[in-house]
């Protein structure tokens, strides 16, 4: 199924999943369930830095083709969200709140990059390939829309255990080199992302002193351009 073959509710899954989960584009009817999932998945991050139901409704209205939801029946168990932006790689420091919140989603239809604002999987549904499928759907959206790639601030939960012995930059470098394992960043690197740096004060998350990694995946369709 291509991205333009969208229905407002779940008639056909975007992924052929043998476990019976349904992958679909975001719809306004999902908003309350996705807010609950967001709060469940990120308990240490301030709620002001997470999507609420109203913001999720606006995202569903403004950019449904680039946003994906995983359902087990009526239960939301995963989501991969993002917006189109013009990303300045010369000035990479920013906060997630610069991109989400209020009436506007931060989506710019002329933007050349897909900015991944959220990827969440219910803890009881992890290790079932959901994250892998969500990244595949994001990459397919980038291919279909002809974008330059995916960029995001990635949470680094494992840094909480190392922050007293090294800087966030050292931690990200060691994870990227395979010397340390991080449940999120290591998975992203395995999915073809680079981790060229860190972002200070990305979200209010005292567990990791507000740090995140900068992650980038470049569209191979545009290699050499």
Image (cartoon, grey):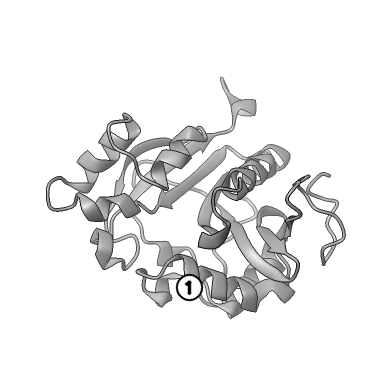
Visible in this render: residue 191?
Answer: yes
Classify residue 59 by image quadrant.
bottom right
Displayed quadrant of residue 103: bottom right
Vertical side of 50 occupied by 5: above or below: above
Query: 24 or 62: nearer the eye?
Result: 24
Tell me what residue is drawn at x 60 percent, y 71 percent: 34
Residue at numbered disc 1: 39
- Residue drawn at x 52%, y 35% is 191
Q: How many marks?
A: 1
Q: Is residue 130 above or below residue 103?
A: above
Residue 47 placement (x, y as % from top left)? 42, 76
Query: In the image, what residue occupies the spot 53% across and 43% down?
Result: 150
| Residue 24 appears left or right of 153 | right
Tell me residue 31's x, y (percent): 65, 75
The N terminus: image quadrant:
top right
Q: List the single residue furthest toward the top.
A: 224
Image position, residue 91 (x, y; %) = 34, 47
Categorize mark 1 by other alpha carbons within 10 Å: few (<14), some (14-19), many (20+): some
Question: Can you see residue 122?
Answer: no
Q: Residue at x 35, y 41 (%)?
A: 90
Residue 152: percent from the left, percent from the top? 46, 49
Q: Residue furthest left?
A: 165
SS class of the residue under badge 1?
helix
Asked whether 17 or 117 is in front, the reply is: 17
């Amino acid at each position: 199924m291509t991205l333009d073959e969208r229905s407002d509710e779940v008639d056909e899954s975007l992924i052929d999943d043998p476990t019976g989960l349904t992958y679909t584009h975001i719809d306004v009817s999902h908003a309350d369930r996705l807010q609950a999932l967001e709060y469940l998945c990120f308990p240490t991050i301030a709620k002001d830095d997470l999507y609420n139901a109203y913001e999720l409704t606006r995202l569903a209205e403004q950019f449904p083709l680039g946003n994906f939801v995983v359902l087990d029946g009526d239960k939301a168990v995963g989501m991969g969200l993002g917006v189109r932006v013009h990303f300045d790689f010369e000035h990479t420091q920013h906060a997630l709140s610069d991109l989400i919140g209020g009436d506007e989603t931060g989506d710019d239809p002329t933007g050349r990059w897909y900015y991944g604002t959220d990827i969440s999987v219910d803890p009881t549904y992890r290790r079932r390939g959901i994250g892998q499928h969500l990244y595949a759907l994001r990459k397919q959206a980038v291919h279909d829309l002809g974008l330059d790639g995916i960029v995001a601030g990635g949470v680094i939960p494992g840094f909480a255990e190392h922050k007293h012995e090294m800087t966030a930059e050292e931690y990200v470098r060691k994870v990227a080199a395979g010397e340390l394992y991080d449940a999120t960043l290591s998975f992203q690197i395995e999915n073809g992302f680079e981790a060229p740096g860190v972002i200070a004060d990305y979200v209010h998350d005292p567990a990791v002193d507000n740090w995140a990694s900068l992650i980038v995946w470049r569209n191979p369709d545009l290699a050499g351009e």
